[in-house]
């Protein structure tokens, strides 16, 4: 088990941030968790420690948002994400973290800039198999390595301007399916070491605290603020990932 106090100084807020996002408040802040923990440990180790905790958070989020989700969207994006996860397992040793960071960063920035520049346009009401299938697959792929599936799936879901609890409930169901589907791949790739699992167990009690905090914040914030927060966090994290990925590719 990891005993370094500096690790827990980064890991505790990282887990709480993920929990707050799972509870529905500012969902894209979750993308900060792995980079925050990566300040003190390898990104793959951070992802492996977080995954069992995320699975528990997903179960709590499913209970919290019970029945409040968009089934037409889920029928499209969940199977597509499973394909993305399969591709990620097959290419895990080939694609570096930097490549994934650049890809997510470009997607996130382009999406948010497009939203801000075209503000005032009506929401996209139609559920699209083509768009949903593509972004669901990308989300499953990027989620596998560094738990960064939020920006791609938000590119698809946010323009629909769903009611806030339906939006967050749909995201909760989607990532519950994605995270549990990632478990066999992590086992296959030997990412679950005894030390990682014991560290996950120590951090596990923070899971329900974070989710409840997020849901409490969600129910006390109006819908417009939730969306604007999502866009701001998505823009900031997209910029951060693009910068870090680009610097890593240049250095490499």
Image (cartoon, rainbow, N blue to C red):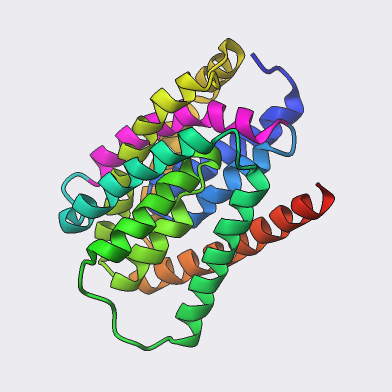
If the image is split into quadrants, where does the N terminus sit?
Answer: top right
Q: Position of residue 20 (x, y in %)?
A: 46, 46
The total of numbered circles placed on residues is 0
Q: Nearer the viewer, residue 197 or 188?
A: 188
Q: Which residue occupies 45% across, 45% down?
A: 141
Q: Is residue 64 magenta?
A: yes
Q: Nearer the viewer, residue 12 or 124?
A: 124
Q: Is residue 158 above or below residue 205?
A: below
Name the residue at the right extreme: 251
Q: Which residue occupies 57% across, 14% down?
A: 193
Q: Which residue occupies 46% across, 19% down?
A: 187
Q: Position of residue 116 (x, y in %)?
A: 49, 82
Q: Give the residues drawn in magenta, as a range.
A: 41-65
Quarter residue 83 falls in: top left
Q: Which residue occupies 51% across, 48% down?
A: 148
Q: Is residue 56 above or below residue 114?
A: above
Q: Is residue 246 left or right of residue 227?
A: right
Quarter residue 95 falls in: top right
Q: Main secondary structure of the magenta part?
A: helix
Q: Position of residue 143 (x, y in %)?
A: 47, 44
The reply to whether residue 227 is in sight is yes
Q: Is residue 58 left or right of residue 62?
A: right
Q: Is residue 89 magenta?
A: no
């Amino acid at each position: 088990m990891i005993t370094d106090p500096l690790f827990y100084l980064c890991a505790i807020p990282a887990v709480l941030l993920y929990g707050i996002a799972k509870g529905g408040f500012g969902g894209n802040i979750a993308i900060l968790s792995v980079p925050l923990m990566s300040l003190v440990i390898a990104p793959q180790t951070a992802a492996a420690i977080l995954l069992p905790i995320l699975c528990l958070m997903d179960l709590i989020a499913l209970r919290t948002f019970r029945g409040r989700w968009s089934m037409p969207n889920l029928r499209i994006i969940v199977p597509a994400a499973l394909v993305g996860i399969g591709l990620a397992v097959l290419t895990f040793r080939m694609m570096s973290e930097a490549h994934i960071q650049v890809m997510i960063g470009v997607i996130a920035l382009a999406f948010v800039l497009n939203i801000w520049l075209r503000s005032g346009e009506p929401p996209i009401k139609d559920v699209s198999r083509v768009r949903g299938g593509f972004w669901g697959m990308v989300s499953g792929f990027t989620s596998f390595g560094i738990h960064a599936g939020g920006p791609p799936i938000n590119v698809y879901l946010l323009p629909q301007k769903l009611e806030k609890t339906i939006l967050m409930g749909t995201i909760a169901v989607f990532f519950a399916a994605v995270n549990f589907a990632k478990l066999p791949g992590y086992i296959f790739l030997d990412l679950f070491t005894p030390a990682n699992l014991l560290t996950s167990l120590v951090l596990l009690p923070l899971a329900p605290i974070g989710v409840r905090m997020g849901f409490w914040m969600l129910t006390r914030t109006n819908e417009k603020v939730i969306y604007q927060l999502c866009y701001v966090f998505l823009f900031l994290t997209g910029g951060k990932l693009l910068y870090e990925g680009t610097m890593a590719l240049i250095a490499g």
